[in-house]
Image: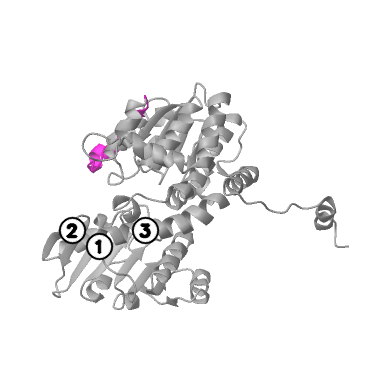
Amino acid sequence: MSIIRDAGLAPSGENKIEWVKRNCPLLRSLEEEFSKTRPFEGKRIALSIHLEAKTAYLCKVLAAGGAEMYITGSNPLSTQDDVAAALVKAGLNVYAWHGATAEEYSAHIRETLSHHANIIIDDGGDLVHMLHTELTDELKYVIGGCEETTTGIIRLNAMAREGKLRFPMVRVNNADCKHLFDNRYGTGQSVWDGINRTTNLIVAGKTVVVAGYGWCGKGVAMRAKGFGARVIVTEVDPIKAIEAVMDGFDVMPMREAAAKGDFFITVTGCAGVITEPDLLAMKEGAILCNAGHFDVEIDMKRLREIASQIREMRNNIMGYTLPNGKHVYVLAEGRLVNLAAGDGHPAEIMDMSFAIQALSAKYLVEHEGRLSELLIDVPREVDLDVARRKLAFLGKKIDELTPEQVEYLNKSAV
């Protein structure tokens, strides 16, 4: 028996990517298909997604389809240097490293976009934003792009309303095979993975406050309940609030929930969700983290200003002594806890999300110059194709409508 282990006594980036590949049958099938059909031959793709092994495998799948890849991360704390190095070794262009400063992060985005990209694959909207503000000369090369996450789509919708968006964008996050699974099951599991491995504290018997009850918030609340926590949801949407109540959770304003929670998880996509009055109302030892894309949901700037002492308690846990003498603890600097303090969504979940990404990019190339809308939903046939492939890999079969049933459903009631 031989045991193969890389030097440094840690798994290499190549091995991490191989592990993902073994657990992503959808992407494997697309890699095989793309290597034959070469849908991206002669095209340049600029990609900004959290740079870890699952993203790396997506990049290799696109490269197998003929794409020239230019890659950066979408959050400095989620970039894994060994994975980035593995992509460089495989001949792809990478501009990112873990812990980049704000200036370095902007420079990485700028460099990624400086190669006349035809397709933009974005996560949060930073690539699209820089193209429209600083690098407008690059716009003439762009066919279109794909947006991965809710926050990015919010930014795209605003740009479109203001008449600023200059090329078509596919709203990948809105696809059923993305948000129903990635946002709910992926976020639900990966957020708690990040919290649990970072804190090493029990969740059962605690009170968890989840800010926001969209698909991500639903997943986080569901998993908290499964761990045995009492769950409070804070919301601004009355319909989502009713849904949370009927799902068995308490609902109240953040100012009221602040005094009750042991864990606080923001997942709204909005700024200023937890502010100074909320912080001062919290019980001793409250733990805060963010699962939204940007580090604006917890007012970290004000927290640092009012704290009389700040000290690192464990890796990825900073303790803050408040003016009232109480202590609160923030995970991963208020950045995306599931990626800054964990490995992100499970591979099987990202298999579906990234299959949607790859097929949406292919759709843009196939329809170059023929797309009149600026904001495009993932074509229904793409969504259904991914779902059928996933079911097949899971070994499951479903019924099909008979011709008579189709006729019944389509005929007029009159």
Element class at badge 3: helix
Q: Determine crowd level at label 1: few under 14, some 14-19, many 20+ residues with C-alpha closer than 10 A.
A: some
Q: Which residues are magenta?
A: 91-106
Residue 191's disc number = 3
Task: Using the numbered discs, state the Cα–Cα distance from disc 2 to disc 3 in whole angstroms.
Answer: 18 Å
Kindly tell me whether residue 48 is visible in this rendering: no
Residue holding disc 2: 314
Q: Residue at x 47, y 65 (%)?
A: 218
Marks 2,1: beta carbons within 8 A: yes
Q: Position of residue 195 (x, y in %)?
A: 31, 61
Position of residue 168 in the picture relative to residue 75 (left or right)? right
Instruction: Tell me the kind of residue under disc 3.
Output: Val
Q: How many marks?
A: 3
Q: Position of residue 176 (x, y in %)?
A: 57, 52
First of labels 2, 3 by sequence position: 3
Q: Position of residue 40 (x, y in %)?
A: 52, 26
Where does the C terminus fall, quadrant-wise? bottom right
Kindly tell me whether residue 215 is visible in this rendering: yes
Decide which of 339, 395 is in the foreground and name it.
395
Task: Using the numbered discs, state the Cα–Cα distance from disc 3 to disc 1 in whole angstroms.
Answer: 12 Å
Task: Using the numbered discs, state the Cα–Cα distance from disc 2 to disc 1 in whole angstroms.
Answer: 8 Å
First of labels 3, 1 by sequence position: 3
Marks 2,3: beta carbons within 8 A: no
Instruction: Tell me the kind of residue under disc 1.
Output: Thr
Query: With respect to residue 260, does 322 lie above or below?
Result: above
Instruction: Tell me the kind of residue under disc 2.
Output: Arg
Residue holding disc 1: 199
Position of residue 324 in the picture relative to residue 67 (left or right)? left
Q: Determine crowd level at label 2: few under 14, some 14-19, many 20+ residues with C-alpha closer than 10 A.
A: few
